[in-house]
Amino acid sequence: MGIFGRGRGRNVGGGRGGGGRGQGQGNKPGSGPVGICVCPSCGHTQSHQVGVPCYNLTCPKCGAKLAKQ
Ligand SMILES: [Zn+2]
């Protein structure tokens, strides 16, 4: 077990892990503006409608403007 004695506690904070790949709601080229609108105030989410920007929608719970997630 000696070879791993050093380097403990050092995180590999490199290029992987925080990227946009691998998430289900990703940006698929050509699939159109489909997604989720989320309320930044209370966390309410609803499906984004084509042709209606999220910022034109208001949250039914608290009335805040929704944002694209
Ligand atoms: Zn809300």
Image (cartoon, grey):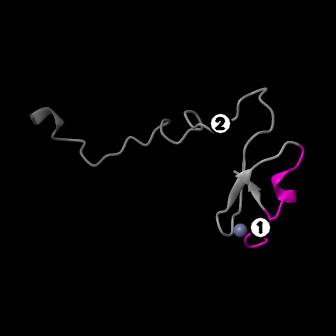
Q: Quadrant of the N terminus?
A: top left
Q: Position of residue 20 (x, y in %)?
A: 60, 38
- Numbered mark located on residue 18 in the image: none
Q: Position of residue 60 (x, y in %)?
A: 77, 67
CA gap, disc 1 to disc 2?
25 Å
Label 1 secondary element? loop
Query: For the residue carrying disc 1, how many other residues have a C-alpha within 10 Å: few (<14), some (14-19), or many (20+)?
Result: few
Can you tell which of label 1 and label 2 is closer to the viewer? 1
Query: For the residue carrying disc 2, how many other residues have a C-alpha within 10 Å: few (<14), some (14-19), or many (20+)?
Result: few
Amino acid, disc 1: Pro
Is residue 43 in the magenta section?
A: no
Question: What residue appears at the point 64 percent right and 39 percent down from the top-left corner?
Answer: 25
Q: Which residue is disc 1 drawn over?
A: 60
Is residue 53 in the magenta section?
A: yes
For the residue pair 10 and 42, the one nearer the viewer reads as 42
Q: Which residue is disc 2 drawn over?
A: 26
Q: Earlier in the sequence, mark 1 or mark 2?
A: 2
**In this picture, is 10 found above or below 43?**
above
**Horizontal side of residue 15 vs 65, given as left or right:** left
Q: Does label 2 point to a residue whose CB lies under 8 Å from ligand 1?
A: no
Q: Which residues are magenta?
A: 51-65
For the residue pair 68 and 9, the one nearer the viewer reads as 68
Q: Quadrant of ligand 1?
A: bottom right
